[in-house]
Image (cartoon, rainbow, N blue to C red):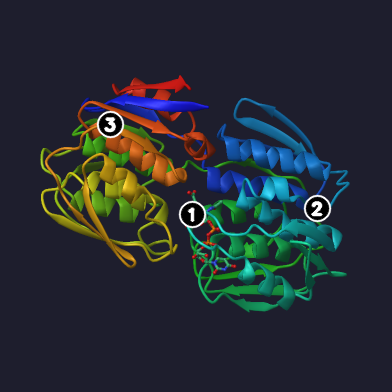
C-alpha cells in the first residue's frame, strides 16, 4: 500500500504532457474482440484499469503484447465468452465486452457490475438496446447472459445519454444485420474516438459526437490501427491544479474542443486560459472567484471534473454552488475536504462551497478516482502536510500523477506504508 505525501504551498510552473485517455482506451481495447488479426493501439496510458482490461482480454483468450504505451492485441482465438465477477467488480468498464462478444459470437456472459462508490450505475439501457436488436437476455447467478443468432439493426432511444451504453451498442451494431440508429446517444469525445477507430476497421458509423448515431451493419471487420486520444479529464485536472496554486502551466496536448465547459468555468473563476498551438496554458489569478457549476452529459460540464473544481472553490472569495446531476452519490470527497478546513454543505444534489482563506493539511482518504484527484489538488494548495491514503483509486486513472506534479514544482512524494 502507498500513500501520497504533499507539503502544500508551491505554485505549479512549467509544462506537463497529457497521457492517452483511460475512458477512450478501455472501449477501444474491448473493440478488439470484434475481429481477429493484429490490432495496433498506441498512446495507451499505463494505469491499473488498463492492466485490468488486458487481464480480461487474456482471460477471454486474446493475445496481448504491450510495449510502453503501445499494444498489439490479437483476438483470433477467443476461447471464453465470459467476463468474470472478479474482474468486473474491480472495473465496471468490463461490461463493454458484452456488445463485441455478442456481435461476433452470438453469445456473451458478463457479471452484473453492481453499485459503486459514486452511484447505483445500472446497465439496464445497455441491455434494453441489445434486446431491441434481437438478443435474448437473462440473469443467471449474478451474470447477464445474452444470446442471439445475429443481431438485427434497430432504432434505439436512450432514456438518458449513457457513455458506456452508447459505446456497447455502437460496437454491437457494427456487425448487425441492417441499420441501427441510436437516439439521445452520448456525445462525449471518447465516443468519437471509438467511432473513428471502428470506421478504420471497416464499420459504417455516422453522427458520432451528436445525439443521433447511425450504424450500417457490415459482414466483417478488419483489425484497427489507432492512436488513443489525449485524456481530457487528466488535462482538466492539471488546469485546475495550475489555477488553484496560482501557477502557470502549459498542459500539452490538451484539446480545447473537448474542454469547452472546463475552460469557460476556469475563466469565470478568474484564471487566465490561453489556447496555444501545442496545448492549453493556465495562469492562476491571486483571487479565485466563486462560480456555479451544474454537471451534465457532454458538452455540459463533466461530472469527472466536479470534485477537482470543488477543491479549487474551497479557496474562492465567496460561495459557489455545485449541482451534481449525473451520479447520485458523487460528493464522497466533501467530508475529506472538510478535514482540510473547507466549508462545504450538501443539500440534496447541490453542494454549497463557502470559500475559506486557507486550507490546512491533514491525513485524508481517497474514496474514488476523481475524489482522490481533488484531495491531491487540495493538498497542493493547503498549508503544511497532507497525506492521501487509498491512492489505488488514483492509480486507476492518472498515469504517474505525482511524478508529473513533482516536475511542475510540487513538493509531493509517494510513500510505502
Ligand atoms: N445509467 C443508467 N442505466 C444505464 C447506463 C447508465 O441509469 O444502463 C445512468 C448512470 O447510473 C448514470 C448516468 O446514466 O447516472 C450516466 O452514466 P454513463 O453510462 O454515461 O456512465 P459510464 O459509461 O458508466 C463513463 C465514464 C465515467 C464517467 C461517466 C459520465 C468510462 C469507463 N467511464 O461511465 O468515468 O463519469 O461516463 O461521463 O468511460 C471516471 O473516469 O472517473 C468515471 C467515473
Which element type, helix, strand or loop, lies under badge 1?
A: helix
Front label number (1 vs 3): 3
Q: Residue at x 81, y 42 (%)?
A: 37
Spatial CA distance of label 1 from label 2 is: 29 Å
Spatial CA distance of label 3 from label 2 is: 43 Å
Which element type, helix, strand or loop, lies under badge 2?
A: strand
Check the image and report above or below for 220 versus 46.
below
How far across and how far down the image is residue 166, in percent? 59, 64
Spatial CA distance of label 1 from label 3 is: 29 Å
How far across and how far down the image is residue 140, in percent? 80, 65
The first of marks 3 and 2 along the sequence is 2
Q: Which residue is mark 2?
A: 82
How far across and how far down the image is residue 371, in percent? 40, 45
**Discs 1, 3 touching: Cβ within 8 Å:** no
Q: Quadrant of residue 146?
A: bottom right
Foreground residue among 131 and 255? 131
Is the CB of mark 2 within 8 Å of ligand 1?
no
Q: Which residue is mark 1?
A: 189
Other residues around mark 3 within 10 Å, as few (<14) / some (14–19) / many (≥20): many
Q: Which residue is mark 3?
A: 380
Can the viewer see residue 262? yes
**Discs 3, 2 touching: Cβ within 8 Å:** no
Residue 400 relative to residue 134: left or right: left
Q: Which mark is residue 307?
A: none
Foreground residue among 376 and 200? 376
Is the CB of mark 1 within 8 Å of ligand 1?
no
Amino acid at each position: 500500500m502507498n500513500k501520497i505525501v504533499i507539503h502544500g504551498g508551491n505554485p505549479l510552473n512549467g509544462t506537463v504532457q497529457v497521457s492517452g485517455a483511460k475512458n477512450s482506451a478501455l472501449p477501444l481495447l474491448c473493440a478488439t474482440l470484434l475481429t481477429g488479426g493484429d490490432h495496433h493501439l498506441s498512446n495507451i496510458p499505463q494505469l491499473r484499469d488498463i492492466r485490468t482490461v488486458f487481464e480480461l482480454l487474456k482471460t477471454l483468450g486474446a493475445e496481448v503484447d504491450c510495449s510502453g504505451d503501445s499494444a498489439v492485441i490479437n483476438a483470433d482465438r477467443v476461447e471464453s465468452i465470459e467476463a468474470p465477477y472478479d474482474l468486473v467488480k474491480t472495473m465496471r468498464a468490463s461490461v463493454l465486452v458484452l456488445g463485441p462478444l455478442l456481435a461476433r459470437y452470438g453469445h456473451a456472459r458478463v457479471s452484473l457490475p453492481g453499485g459503486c462508490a459514486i452511484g447505483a450505475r445500472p446497465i439496464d439501457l445497455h441491455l434494453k438496446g441489445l434486446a431491441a436488436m434481437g438478443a435474448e437476455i437473462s440473469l443467471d447467478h449474478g451474470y447477464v447472459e445474452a444470446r442471439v443468432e445475429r443481431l438485427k439493426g434497430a432504432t434505439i432511444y436512450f432514456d438518458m445519454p449513457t457513455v458506456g451504453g452508447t459505446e456497447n451498442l455502437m460496437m454491437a451494431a457494427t456487425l448487425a444485420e441492417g441499420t441501427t440508429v441510436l437516439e439521445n446517444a452520448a456525445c462525449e469525445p471518447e465516443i468519437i474516438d471509438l467511432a473513428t477507430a471502428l470506421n478504420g476497421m471497416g464499420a459504417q458509423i455516422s453522427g458520432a459526437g451528436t445525439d443521433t448515431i447511425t450504424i450500417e451493419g457490415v459482414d466483417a471487420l478488419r483489425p484497427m490501427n489507432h492512436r488513443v486520444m489525449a485524456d481530457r479529464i487528466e488535462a482538466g485536472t492539471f488546469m485546475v491544479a495550475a489555477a488553484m496554486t496560482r501557477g502557470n502551466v502549459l498542459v500539452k496536448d490538451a484539446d480545447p474542443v473537448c474542454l469547452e465547459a472546463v475552460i469557460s468555468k476556469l475563466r469565470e473563476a478568474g484564471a487566465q486560459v490561453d489556447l496555444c498551438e501545442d496545448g492549453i496554458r493556465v495562469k492562476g489569478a491571486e483571487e479565485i472567484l466563486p462560480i456555479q457549476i451544474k454537471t451534465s452529459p457532454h458538452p455540459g460540464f463533466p461530472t469527472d471534473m466536479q470534485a477537482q473544481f470543488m477543491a479549487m472553490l474551497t479557496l474562492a472569495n465567496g460561495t459557489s454552488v455545485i449541482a451534481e446531476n449525473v451520479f447520485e452519490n458523487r460528493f464522497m470527497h466533501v467530508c475529506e475536504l472538510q478535514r482540510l478546513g473547507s466549508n462545504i454543505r450538501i443539500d440534496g444534489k447541490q453542494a454549497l462551497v463557502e470559500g475559506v482563506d486557507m486550507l490546512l493539511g491533514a491525513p485524508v482518504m481517497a474514496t474514488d478516482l476523481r475524489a482522490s484527484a481533488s484531495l491531491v489538488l487540495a493538498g497542493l494548495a493547503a498549508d503544511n502536510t497532507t497525506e492521501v491514503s487509498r491512492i489505488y483509486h488514483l492509480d486507476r486513472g492518472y498515469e504517474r500523477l505525482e511524478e508529473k506534479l513533482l516536475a511542475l514544482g510540487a513538493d509531493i512524494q509517494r510513500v510505502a506504508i
